[in-house]
Amino acid sequence: NIEGVFAVVTNPTVLPESVRGQRVESTVFDISLFTADGNPVPLESEVEICLEVNGKEFNKDDYCLGFIDEEQKPPVWVCQDSCLRKGRDQQLCGTTDHFTS
């Protein structure tokens, strides 16, 4: 937690056409950090993102924390962290040094 910094998480409803055929197992989130007055905040170190996995049993090695690389034409799904760890309950957690935006 960084004092005065807020995370904004949005859920785009449509994946880019080029990514739809790739193995994307979860909802895609757009995560951004902003100060209280609305200025974007760049990441200065890695952050941990934890997402809930639906299902009674899962193998963490079958998942990857990834992102859509929109600088590629067409956009592609890129694995950022394949060494996920189990978090609380049914969560898988991974780290990243950047957000998509």
Image (tube, rainbow, N blue to C red):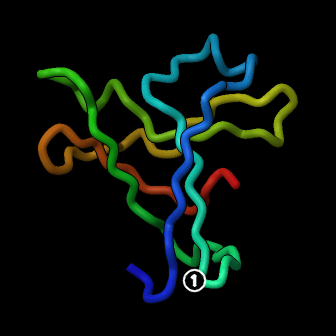
Q: Position of residue 16 (x, y in %)?
A: 73, 24
Other-residue count near label 1 (Cα within 10 Å), few / some / many at <14 / 14–19 / ≥20: few
The three-letter amino acid code for the residue at tag 1 is Ala
Residue at figure coordinates x 55%, y 40% from the top left:
11
Q: Position of residue 58 (x, y in %)?
A: 20, 24
29 left or right, relative to 95: right
Residue 86 vertical placement versus 64 (above, below): below
Residue at figure coordinates x 64%, y 15% from the top left:
20
Residue named by callout 1: 36
Report the front residue among 94 and 35.
Answer: 35
Residue at figure coordinates x 66%, y 37% from the top left:
68
Q: Position of residue 27 (x, y in %)?
A: 47, 31
When asked about the image quadrant of residue 52, the answer is: top left
Residue 8 vertical placement versus 24 (above, below): below
Report the front residue among 17 and 59.
Answer: 17
Residue furthest out toward the bottom: 3
Considering the numbered disc 1 on the image, is that residue within a helix, a strand or a loop? Answer: loop
Residue furthest out toward the right: 73
Report the front residue among 5 and 59.
Answer: 5
90 left or right, relative to 27: left
78 left or right, relative to 64: right
